[in-house]
């Protein structure tokens, strides 16, 4: 919900599990002038991968991840997801 603030101030941003089903969030992201990274999972009802990829080339989409970025199966799989998220954030910040 802070996307309007970031857009208004031209701030680079990392959005973890953004609410891409809310028009006000999508509108704010659409008018952002600074780069941003979107991270979400296909099992998150708030995520829309098609919208994410339309808004930015910086997208990490995790198959089967829910809003908490947890995936089915052993907890180690969700820990691996956390590692992927951290790596994506690190690479984005270093750009």
Image: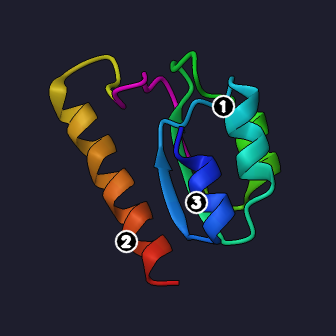
Mark 1 or mark 2, which has the lower sequence index? 1
User: Residue furthest toward the bottom?
Assistant: 95
**CA–CA distance in space, label 1 to label 3:** 16 Å
Query: In the image, is 79 to the left or to the right of 72?
Result: left
Cβ–Cβ under 8 Å for marks 2 and 3: no
Cβ–Cβ under 8 Å for marks 1 and 2: no
Q: Position of residue 88 (x, y in %)?
A: 44, 62
Task: Please give the count of numbered marks on the rendered protein.
Answer: 3
The colour mode here is rainbow
Q: Position of residue 61 (x, y in %)?
A: 56, 41
- Seen at 76% across and 28% down, the residue is 23
User: Callout 3 environment at 10 Å: few (<14), some (14 to 19), or many (20+)?
Assistant: some
Mark 2 or mark 3, which has the lower sequence index? 3
Mark 1 or mark 3, which has the lower sequence index? 3
Mark linked to residue 20:
1
On the image, numbered disc 2 is attached to which residue?
Answer: 90
Q: Position of residue 44 (x, y in %)?
A: 51, 20
On the image, numbered disc 3 is attached to which residue?
Answer: 6
- Seen at 56% across and 58% down, the residue is 37
**CA–CA distance in space, label 1 to label 2:** 23 Å
- Seen at 57% across and 15% down, the residue is 45
Q: Which residues are magenta?
A: 60-69
Residue 16 visible somewhere in the drawing: yes
Q: Quadrant of residue 7?
A: bottom right
Query: In the image, is 7 to the left or to the right of 67?
Result: right
Query: In the image, is 91 to the left or to the right of 74?
Result: right
Considering the whole magenta stretch, tell me its main secondary structure: loop
**CA–CA distance in space, label 2 to label 3:** 19 Å
Nearest to viewer (mark 1 / mark 3): 3
Q: Secondary structure at mark 1?
A: loop
């Amino acid at each position: 919900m802070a996307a309007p603030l970031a857009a208004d101030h031209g701030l680079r941003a990392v959005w973890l599990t953004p609410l891409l089903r809310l028009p006000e969030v999508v509108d704010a992201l659409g008018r952002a002038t600074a780069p941003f990274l979107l991270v979400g999972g296909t099992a998150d009802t708030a995520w829309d991968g098609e919208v994410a990829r339309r808004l930015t080339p910086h997208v990490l989409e995790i198959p089967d991840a829910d809003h908490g970025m947890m995936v089915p199966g052993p907890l180690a799989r969700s820990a691996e997801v956390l590692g992927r998220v951290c790596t994506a954030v690190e690479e984005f910040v270093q750009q």
